[in-house]
Amino acid sequence: MAKVRLLELAHARSGDKGDTANVGLIAWDEEAYHVLVQQVTTGNVKHHFGEMVQGGVERFELPNLLALNFLLHGALDGGGTVSLMTDAQGKVLSTALLRMEIDVPAEMAERVRGRGRPPGLATAKAGR
Amino acid sequence: MRPVSADCVRVAGGQGFWGDDQEAPVRQVEGGRIDYLMLDYLAEVTMSIMQKQRSRDPAAGYARDFVPLMERILPACVEQGVKVVTNAGGVNPPACARAVGEAAERVDVAGLRTAVVAGDDLMDRLDALLAAGHPMKNMDTGAPLASIRDRVRSANVYMGARPIVEALQGGAQVVVTGRSTDTALTYAPMIHEFGWRWDAYDLLAAGVVAGHVNECGAQVTGGNCLAEWWTIPGLAEVGFPIVEARAAGDFVVTKHEGSGGLVTLRTVKEQLLYEMGDPTAYVTPDATADFTTVRLSEDGPNRVRVGGVRGGPPTPFLKVSVAYSHGYKAVGTLVYAWPDAAAKARAAACVLRRRLDRLGLAFDAVRVELVGWDSTHGQLAGEPPPDLPEVQLRVGVRSDDRGAVERFSREIAPLVLAGPPSVTGFAGGRPAVQEVMAYWPALIDRGAVEPGFAVDFFEA
């Protein structure tokens, strides 16, 4: 097994509803989707964000889009206009989730290495 | 011009929020054939801003940008038979419609029929509704609205497609609404054109999905798209979305030929998931859509077909959006340079906090961020390296006590001479003290508010 970042398996978009952020995590392909379903659990996501998410994490599966939707409750310091955060509407929390590392078979890790970043910027050790 | 065929209606998205690209609706009208232009101006906080504007000027309280825009595009819309459906009316749809009528006269458009959809504004009825046993509890916390009644600045119930359809059936070329749902602006024209029944939930749900696709402008045509963003061409002249809907409920997402941006499975998926809650129950006033039934397929370059959408009935409730005053806040920033930029910025934050403590100021929240290091990814960014070339210290405070926030705003500048070194970037002056408008989502029985929804027609 080898570690990859979610960025190498998926793209994502996030938004807000009050103090809750949502992150839609979209697999690059079906193989990646099955890995996400297995490994990107509510518990793992909650652990990944730590204190950044004050409330619970919910997960919904959208196999038709090869996507998972996460609700991160209490992630926005009150949300909207109340929040003092730069990212008060959770616009880039999607990318914070894409930092998460999971284990995949070494052969798969080799294949997806560097995905999600422009050629030349995507070195094997980038950002680690 | 009429639709490509009687079976197809092209609804173009022209604004994703108040302040979006002013040229986009012009490009939508001039760039090729469309039947409807949908313009979404309202976000949750927008209504309270408009309410404040109307309290100062009874003729204000709507998206003013909409009027000069109409002045530009009305002649072409009339000539090509493009109907405009918008929630630009804000908290004052009649004033907005009157201004559009005056704009029509200025550009010699005669006989323009405009419909005003209103009745969503609950401010004058709020106490009567509370007294009649509608607590409008906060959907997140369960607290009753009565607990913040004296601080309420605006209260609007979300209207669905019915009054817009009534306006279109009444022959309106321009439909100006108050707080209609964003999605209804797109699917009301479909209901009108195709004669969909109000219990045809799969069709209505397909319309809801089309509305969700259309409501954020270029966010579905390559804008803000993370998937291989460096390959997306022509964002400077990005094409805004067009939904080509068919009576059977399937539709194609596309954009004008020759425009920039991209429509692919990836761009559409990202927008479908934007601001998504439970995807199996996307609730609107007219139907509940199940986004797990959506089927996407490629239909040529920059064309994605959407089908298979299933839906169910709406709930007995409508959503109410309340904005209320929630104290004050201010955010101050300073920039620290290498060496040890982050360490200096953190030391400065400590000095500031200590001075605020000694002044005995009470804050509900104090937040310290290092922009350039942890302001977006928080603790996931780890510890900053000592050789970070520079970092911006950003400190925000929030309090019910306006005086405390004002005093905070005067404590930033002194750090330049009386704090850690290598600091700059204070040219902007004192941080502005802002009143915080908080958002209170609630539900209300339909029967309590729907009879108040009304459609009026103006001829200009």
Image (tube, rainbow, N blue to C red):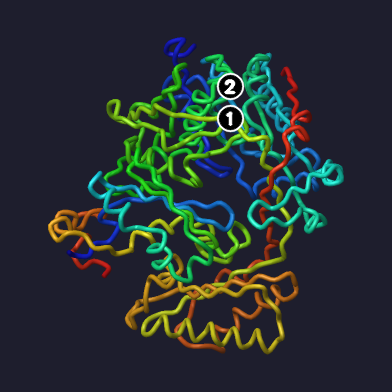
Q: Secondary structure at mark 1?
A: loop
Q: Using the image, tell me which numbered label, if any, was put on residue B313.
A: 1
- Which residue was labeled with disc 2? B199
Residue at the image position 31 percent from the left and 30 percent from the top: B297
Mark 1–mark 2 Cα distance, whole angstroms, equals 7 Å
Helix, strand or loop under label 2: loop
Q: Is residue B163 above or below residue B408?
A: above
Q: Quadrant of the C terminus of chain A?
A: bottom left
Q: Is residue B74 above or below residue B387?
A: above
Tell me the quarter of the image containing the N terminus of chain A.
bottom left
Q: Earlier in the sequence, mark 1 or mark 2?
A: 2
Under mark 1, the amino acid is Pro
Report crowding for label 2: few under 14, some 14 to 19, many 20 or more residues within 10 A (C-alpha).
Answer: few
B90 on left or right of A87: right
Quadrant assignment, res B163: top right
The residue lying at 78 percent from left, 35 percent from top is: B448
Q: Quadrant of residue B407?
A: bottom right
Along the viewing direction, whichever of B169 and B429 lies nearer the viewer: B169
Q: Position of residue B381 (x, y in %)?
A: 37, 71
Percent of width and height locating residue A45: 40, 62
Please, which chain is the residue tagged with disc 2 on? B
Mark 1 and mark 2 in contact? Answer it, CB < 8 Å: yes
Q: Is residue B18 left or right of residue B28?
A: right
Q: What's the residue type where badge 2 is placed?
A: Asp
